[in-house]
Amino acid sequence: MPPTIQQRLIDESTADRVLRERFFHARRQAKGPFVIVGERVMHISTAAVGLVHSTDHALLWEWACDAATSAEPGESWLRLTSGRPVAAHVRPIVDAGVLVGMLVLLDPVDQRPATNTPSAGPTTFRPSYGWASLTASERSVAAIIAEGATNRDAAARLFLSRHTIDFHLRQIFRKLDISSRVALTRLVIQHYGADPDFEAA
């Protein structure tokens, strides 16, 4: 049975509360710029003001979701709305076994040794649309949904919140220019056979 509006509001308010509490805790501990990011909210530390804008929310959330569920998380280069490239590290924020958000530590590139400074933008470039535009996390979600799983089932299997799965699906549908799970299933079957490196988590 799908969750009621009241249940969704309770889930969202709980996640927002956890992220707010973690932000206040991190503010006392972290020395450099950081953000706490969730699907609906983003808290920016004082040191990150001017580096991160509210318009970076979607970029940071999508990157953090992918980085947090990556088999080999590490440092990534991002170019923010401000135009400044940063090195970013992610630390998952979990509540009751569910991923509700991320702590993203930021290190402005222009403050790092010149030998470590990239020429431009992130080290990995991905197209904006099409199958190749999907992140590893989005491909995992797509594969599970193609098996007939509900969003709640996918969330349980990937240890993510249902809202995070909802976000991933919206991104997948947008990038693939589709509007149904049937169309997604066709594409997964097509690319699973064509791409031997594709593996569902």
Image (cartoon, rainbow, N blue to C red):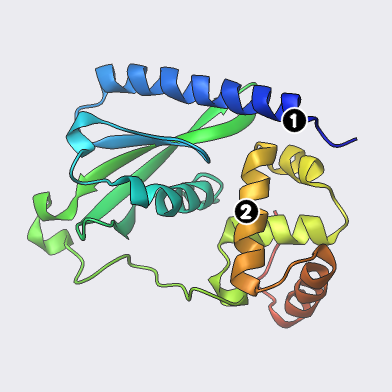
Point out the frontmost of discs 1 and 2.
Answer: 1
Horizontal relation, residue 68 to residue 146: left or right = left
What's the residue at 70%, 64% (across, down)? Answer: 199
Horizontal relation, residue 108 to residue 24: left or right = left
Circle 2: residue type: His
**Which residue is disc 1 drawn over?**
5
Circle 1: residue type: Ile
**Which residue is disc 2 drawn over?**
168
Residue 104, image x and y in percent? 36, 39
Disc number placed over residue 136 in the picture, else none: none
What's the residue at 26%, 17% (across, down)? Answer: 28
Above/below status of 2 relative to 130: above
What's the residue at 80%, 30% (across, down)? Answer: 4
Element marked by disc 2: helix
Nearest to N terminus: mark 1 or mark 2: 1
Q: Compute the Cα span from label 1 to label 2.
A: 20 Å
Q: Based on the displayed image, in which of its 4 quarters is residue 155 positioned?
A: top right
Horizontal relation, residue 4 to residue 201: left or right = right
Above/below status of 68 relative to 136: above
Whether residue 97 can be seen here? no
Residue 78, image x and y in percent? 31, 58
What's the residue at 60%, 55% (across, down)? Answer: 137
Element marked by disc 1: helix
Are discs 1 and 2 less than 8 Å apart at CB?
A: no
Residue 59, image x and y in percent? 42, 54
Residue extending farthest to the front is 5
Q: Quadrant of the N terminus?
A: top right
Above/below status of 22 relative to 184: above
Residue 112, image x and y in percent? 12, 51
Whether residue 46 can be seen here? yes
Graded by Cα atoms within 10 Å as few (under 14), some (14 to 19) or many (20 or more), the crowding at tag 1 reads few
Residue extending farthest to the bottom is 194
